[in-house]
Amino acid sequence: MKVLFVDDEADIRELIEIAIMIEDDIEATFAGSGSEALALLETQVFDVMLLDVMMPPPDGLHVLRAARANPDQDTAKIVMCTARTSPESEAEFRGLGADHVLHKPFKPLKLADYIRSIA
Amino acid sequence: MSRPDFFPEVERVDGTRSKTKFRLLTALVALVFIFDLVLLAVADHRRSEARAQQQLRHFAELFEQSLDASLAVANLEMWAMIDDISYVPLRNKQYIEQSYGRRMRRAMLEIEQIDSLVLLSTDGTVMWSTAEGLLGMNLADRAYFANAITLSRGEYTVGSPITSRANSRHLTPIAWPVISRSGELRGVVASSLGAEYFGKLLSLQDVGDDMIVRLVTADGASAFAIGPEEAIDTSQLMTATRPLPEVGLRIEVSRTRKAVMRTFWERTIIFGLITSALSVIVLVSVLRTRAQSVKLASALKQSELDRMKIQATQREFDAIFENVGDGIVVFDDLGTLHRSNLAARQFLNAKDDESAVNCLRNRLPLLTEIPKETAVIPLSLPQTGCAETPQTMQCRVMKLQLYGAEIAYCVLEDISAQERLSETRMSFITSVNHELRTPLTSLSGALDLLRDRFGAELPAGASKLVSMATRNADRLLVLVNDILTLQAIDQNQLLISLEPIRVSDALCDAVQTNAGYGLGRNVTIAADPLPDGEDAIVMLDPIRLQQILSNLVSNAIKYSPQGSQVRIGAELLPDSVRFYVTDRGPGIPSDALGRLFERFGKPIHGRDLQASGTGLGLAITRELVQRQGGEISVTSRSQFDGAQDTGTTFHIRFPRHTKDTGHTT
């Protein structure tokens, strides 16, 4: 299962990397910015994408739009990660094509189980 | 603010001066009055005296005239008798009786002036008398005899009064010489003027009771007197005298000064009383008038001061009205009242009051459509030249029924600044949300991973430190979450989506959610079964309700002694549901109950008892309860208050959801 993590926080990326490392069925790819993610979308196809919303432009929403505009990524489950918990923002994300919303802060240890549950 | 009085000094000085003046004037008038009264009295006294004197003289004259006339008549008749008895010398008493007895008796009866008759010979022997005892007596030593024999025809003499030896009467002797037509002296006829005679004579005149009339002989003896008998000090008498030269008598008419002046004093006293009464009346009315006028003057002055105060207040009000930051527009439904202040004219971009009112009225609903109480009407106004952002205004309108017209008082508030501020606050919160949570996520996640993956490899001390770090990271996360929740509540941005919830389900969830936490502290949680197996439905936000119950349950667990039980449950009341969470902890001191729900309040317990927390849990709980229409209360038996069976119970009451309203909402 190919999973794309996009987050501008290096610490978070590293943390997740350590947490996911031992999971054999998850092949994680990391992007540190929106543009990096956009480039990866052109070359690889992912089963699951976890996109941080708040990033310097292009932000998570931009990446989400690009992913949904890309027919190669049609099957990908897209999860938006955000600290914003309001139903309005969740509705907005879902309107743009997100499948799930993951509220920050989340526990990295439980991430693998979460990914398996939605995939 | 107390405003200083204007010119109070001047008023006081004025008042004192006018009072002094008035007193002087009153005293002067009183003095003049008294002086005039005295002057009048003195003049009246003099006049009275003169009049009395005149009256006395008049009486004296009257007496003189009547006496004169009476004596003249008696004289003539006596001389007629004398002519009858003077033909021969008087020698034989018996002859005299025979010849003249009848004549003389007749004379005595006819002449009323005389009451007795004595005929004396030239040597003074009594030849005939109406009083028998006198016969043969010699009366030559009598003064009237001596006088009488010297007189010529037609004359008579009146002697000094004597007391009669015969009958002890007070008599005034009167005597005529008996002279024959040939001029021979034959003897003397003597008689007396009796009291009866004078009494009769004087009673003809109107003699006042208090008048003393005396006939005084030449030697000063009183021949006859009528009037008050008692001896009167002559210096107190007022006397008029009239001489009767023919008979050598004088008449004295006197009255006591007291009697004369009695009427004067009566008159003076009555007059004085009346005038005094009148002047007192006048004075009183003058005083009253003055008091009234003083009052009036002070009232006028006061009203003048009030007017000035009102003016000052008006000016103050105008200054505040004009310069206050909010726009104020006042108008009525008749179109006659137009007022606006500077801010209002700027907001409405109007040059004067009238255009400001018109501009605002065009943007407001009709006056009659505005409710009576304060109405808040949002306004959007055209951007004024210098404003950078569009103006979002709101207009508070209050209608008052005044002076028979409907007057609208409008306050224009620029709420765009408020909106900007709240936007800024929101974006601040959002960024804090992100900026705080991101590192916390990393920290907490890293610690979790460390414990999970490398926990076994860590030395015992390091493992302890990692636990401590994890615990504190979690605590910090809770704190950030709590602050954000409260912020959302304060900003009215807390989302509450009401759903019907079964009370039994809510209790079950609360037990399940917190059981793990209790297990860590060796405290069990039990939900009391609902009474009679009944159940009820409340209309609440399920997440918020769990938040509330969890807050209370975790608090209860925190303070419960090891091995004890925290009980939750609900009482079903006719129209409400009352949840409770009760523990057997040390209890809350009664003096701390009041500040229990304060944010970051002073710790309730001492250092040894106080459990760690954010200090916001109960504040958030209360807000969440109140936002959902509930109320929270607490009762406690504290060991600090000396209670044995300690513990704390929190009650939360929510309105019960009835089937009817449940399906319609």
Image: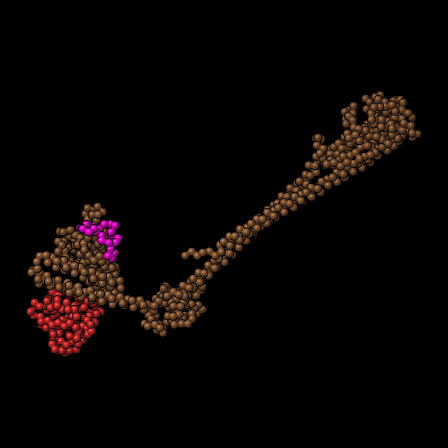
Chain colours: A red, B brown
| Nearer the observer, B253 or B412 | B412
Q: Is residue B422 magenta?
A: no
Position of B319 relative to B136 (above/below): below
Question: Against B44, is B370 above or below?
Answer: below
Classify the position of the C terminus of chain B by image quarter: bottom left
Majority secondary structure in the magenta region: loop
Where does residue B217 sit, x and y in percent of width and height? 79, 31
Q: Nearer the viewer, residue B466 or B259?
A: B466
Q: Which residues are magenta?
A: B583-608
Is residue B556 in view?
no
Q: Position of residue B336 (x, y in %)?
A: 45, 69
Please name the residue shown 36% across and 64% down the image: B374
Q: Residue furthest top?
A: B136
In the image shown, does B23 or B103 lie closer to the viewer?
B23
Q: Considering depth in this image, is B86 or B211 the residue closer to the camera?
A: B211
Q: Residue at x 71, y 40 (%)?
A: B49
Q: Position of residue B295 (x, y in %)?
A: 52, 53
Q: Is residue B316 visible?
A: yes
Point 12% across, 59% down: residue: B466
